Image: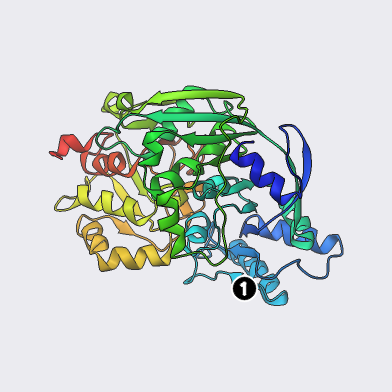
Amino acid sequence: MTITEKILAVHSGKKEVYPGELINAKVDLILANDITAPIAIKEFEKIGAKKVFDKDRIALIPDHFAPQKDIKAAEQCKMLKDFSRGHDLSLYFEVGRMGIEHALLPEQGLVVPGDLVIGADSHTCTYGALGAFATGVGSTDVASAMATGECWFKVPETIKFIYYGNLNKWVSGKDLILYTIGDIGVDGALYMAMEFTGEAISNLPMHGRLTMCNMAIEAGGKNGIIAPDKITEEYVKVRAKRDYKFYFSDEKAVYREIKEYDCSKIKPTVACPHLPSNTKPAEELANISIDQVVIGSCTNGRLEDLRESAMILKGKKVNPNVRMIVFPATQQIYKEAMKEGLLEIFIDAEAVVSTPTCGPCLGGHMGILAKGEKAIATTNRNFVGRMGHPDSEVYLSNPAIATASAVLGRIGLPEELGL
């Protein structure tokens, strides 16, 4: 079996499972946010459930329209707080203690290798970077899982992606996944497990792995997953709140397809409007002027991402025609960035540093685009109207390209700044 099949088999009490099989499986953690949890809470109450299956296994995180941007957002967030209080949930994260959900849960050791995690948010697939099976589900599935501790699944087929060779300068996990989506398309892995392997993945730090698995859904994937190793162990052993187990794919595991990529041929990559699959090398986009730069999100808001951005920005100014907004993904990342002097670099460069929030990524608040404006962002989606007006445009890149673009006033490379 593949690593995905093994985790699903264990959680469904079976010796083995097969692609296409329908199973019922026990979940280790359930996640919902201020957009999706209110629906789940209403459905939970509608089915007559009186109590949750486990008050320590349900994480409710207000992060999309939080800090609350208006009365409707405030009422949504209040539903999370009231439900958490009413059921004595230990994993409710109020503003000031929260972060962007998919950065917060791994950081806090609440997702561990071998877990089966569901979240009412499509980017729940992020946690596959830890060797867990994690996938986004609908709010009604979350409602029933909050009551029963179980969820149904169709066992997915698996595509194996092998990355070999050394990464070029300024190429990161973001570029690998953008390149991959550009190759297979936004439905290239529809309802399939995307298993990322190869020497380039073995050498990829955890933040890069989290970025890759985060965007599996942008290829239609059911989940993204990376087999745990020494890098995984180092990350989880100081964080894990529960026991964990490493699973690996068998040598004789059956794959739907195997794709191989020579990383030495992959350049810094940008997804152009209006699909994550519409990718081009950044060097071919030097004629695209921009109005806004966003550094952050559950995709690239980790400390390493902020360090890379600050390194490029140090001693420079954001182009006068550009606004740059930096969103550390969690309070802890914010604090570490402050200690390291990164926030001072951003502010001295005339960028704005914000509290953790999903904010502009989903066109929520704090960074909405007007008609005709263009942004380059380290986020994960660039659909029509994703960050604001339907006639605005969003380009996706890694933090290095986005930051260099902020200084240049157009899409560009760090090399153009002498780096």
Name which residue lies at 63% across and 58% down: 32
- Identified by mark 1, the residue type is Ser
Q: Residue 414, located in which quarter of the rendered image?
A: top left
Name which residue lies at 44% across and 34% down: 177
Please provide percent x and percent y for residue 201. Answer: 40, 38
Q: Disc 1 marks which residue? A: 90
Name which residue lies at 19% across and 59% down: 348
Please provide percent x and percent y for residue 82. Answer: 68, 73
Left or right: 134 with respect to 11? left
Q: Residues within 10 Å of mark 1 (few under 14, many from 20)?
A: some
Extreme-front residue of the structure: 251
403 shown above or below 336: above
- Report helix, strand or loop for mark 1: loop
341 shown above or below 389: below
| Front residue of 339 and 396 | 339
Please provide percent x and percent y for residue 246. Answer: 55, 50
Please provide percent x and percent y for residue 187. Answer: 59, 27
Q: State the scheme by which the image is colored.
A: rainbow
| Front residue of 197 and 317 | 197
308 shown above or below 238: above
Is residue 373 visible in the rendered structure shown here? Answer: no
